[in-house]
Image (cartoon, grey):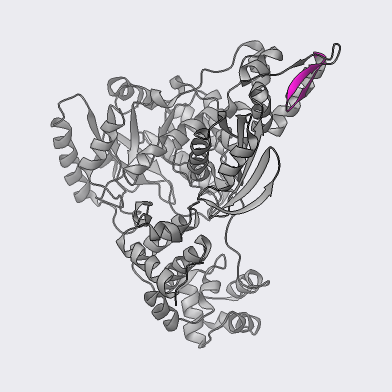
Amino acid sequence: MAAPSLSNAEIAGRFELLGDLLELEGAVVYRVLAYRRAAKTLRETPESVARLSEQGKLVELPNIGVTINDKVTELLATGSIAALDKVIARNPPGAVAVMHVPGIGPKTARKIFSELQISTVEDAVQAARDGRIRDLPGMGEKTEKLLIEGLADGAPQRGRARVSVARLRPFAERVVDSLARVDGVEACEIAGSLRRYAETAKDIDIVCAARNPGEVIDAFTASDWVTEVDGQGEAKATCIAHDGTRVELRIVDPECFGNLLAHLTGSKAHNVALRESAVRRKLSISEYGITDTNTGEVTRSAGEEGVYARLGLPLIPPELRENRGEIEAARAGTLPDLIRLDQIRGDLHSHTDWTDGKATLEEMVEAARARGYSYLNITDHSPAVGFGMGLDADRLRAQIERVRALDAAQTDGFRVLVGTEVDILKDGSLDYPDELLAELDVVVASPHASHRLSADGQTKRICAAVENPHVDIIGHPTARKIGLREGYPLDIEAVIAAAAANGTVLEVNAQPDRLDLRDTSIRLAVEAGVKLSIDTDAHSIAALDYMRFGVMNARRGWATADDVVNTREWPELRKLLRKGG
């Protein structure tokens, strides 16, 4: 039977289950990851996946190829996916829930269900309570305790309340672009935490300047991405997108657009500090103007510059509005000249299809050139990572030759640099010998495993890599994955001190699910004089465009162009790096 009413979450859930069951069976990891990445894309797509499928546009989404597209088509047409039905039939119904209990995993879950000949979550919990799991090879009372506690209230819950700014912001920009084309709209901006580029957000706030609010609201609520109108008034409306995102629209007269935009941009702490400062100047701030409490005169501003000027301040960039000293700096005239995207001269962390990238070496180089860069550093994985596709020493040497030849063939001055993303092992040693690392232009050393080390262990591990004379950059230093995994509990101040002492660069990773370093750590690094590198960690051509999120995160950390090494052309950059200096 047909299933046209399936939501994005329901469609995504089918592919998440397929990936989980295949992992449970020990399938090739790339196959599992393909389904999980597809599920993530489907779940986070604001437009209706069913409608995109009908229009033949589903394959335009990232991580959606022909195979996934065909399965979505099958699901919408028949209500099921034959491949999923087959794998469901082969596995115990409770095994997926058990494998997602923290500390259990697919191998342990598979062993529990097969060895004990059980099938449901309830069976597994009862076996743990009966003490039968501790008798299985490699298990003990700890496994039973994990299982009982993890399933105390049924299957473990997955999902997140907040989403990475880099995931939510592109959709918000599409909504703003659409509203800006509505007749009568004079200005339209993203507000809230998304405008400040805070690392996560749970909804979208938009402010429009227009004298015909009813027409704007009609256009807003009629948008293709809207699955539900959650509220509507004369000058505001709230709609729900197909991925569950709430989008709140406020409409105001053009002459006080700046007042409302500043108010809704926040942050709350910044607004409170502004109000306290205004009171001392005998002023009162509201969403629609600034009132002189002595005369009653109200100043309204079409732009935010007027709002801050009325308070005796220069315009404070949205990224700094967190009440972390920005008001005092503005008053003293010491606000930093924050780094801009157009100052980035190259990307020092990128991957190709030699390991787990999607594009060829040549394709990545051309894409970097098309973005106006002067260089691209190729940093495919070392053997310890890359899902079994990391380059061993012989393959890395072969890549070095290939990159050197490609670099020599460039006729416009563009440089193709040869590097690596070498794994930082559990003890702080590196996954390649020093003599091999010495052959490379830029070495990025990154942590990818051993997530359960203590804070002291993680700190010593990262600091050991920082101190290695062959390491130029520490990639995504805390290894966090927003919404999935907290960063390492390391002493970031100790890492920053080590970087300062050794001249090692710390990366601001622009991947939407990383944004690592986080803004507060960037600020500490800047204050310590540590240099930063803003990189995309791109595994595809499209991912090179993540650079803007790294730049915005660096801006939140008060970074300037001078603080970031890849604002330099290669000859100057090479001198900055210890290997070239």
Residue 70 position in % (x across, y down): 34, 66
Tally of marks:
0
Q: Is residue 23 visible?
A: no
Q: Is residue 334 visible?
A: yes
Magenta residue span: 281-292
Q: Which residue is nearer to you in this view: 379 or 577?
A: 379
Image quadrant in which the C terminus is located: top left
For this orientation, the residue located farthest to the bottom is: 117
Residue 320 position in % (x across, y down): 60, 26
The verdict on residue 289 being magenta is yes
Q: Which residue is nearer to you in this view: 41 or 540?
A: 41
Q: Residue at 68%, 37% (x, y): give it.
A: 235
Looking at the image, residue 544 lies above or below residue 301: below
Looking at the image, residue 159 lies above or below residue 27: above
Q: Which residue is nearer to you in this view: 46 or 372?
A: 46
Looking at the image, residue 127 lies above or below residue 195: below
Q: Is residue 333 left or right of residue 233?
A: left
Residue 468, quarter of the rendered image: top left
Looking at the image, residue 99 lies above or below residue 559: below
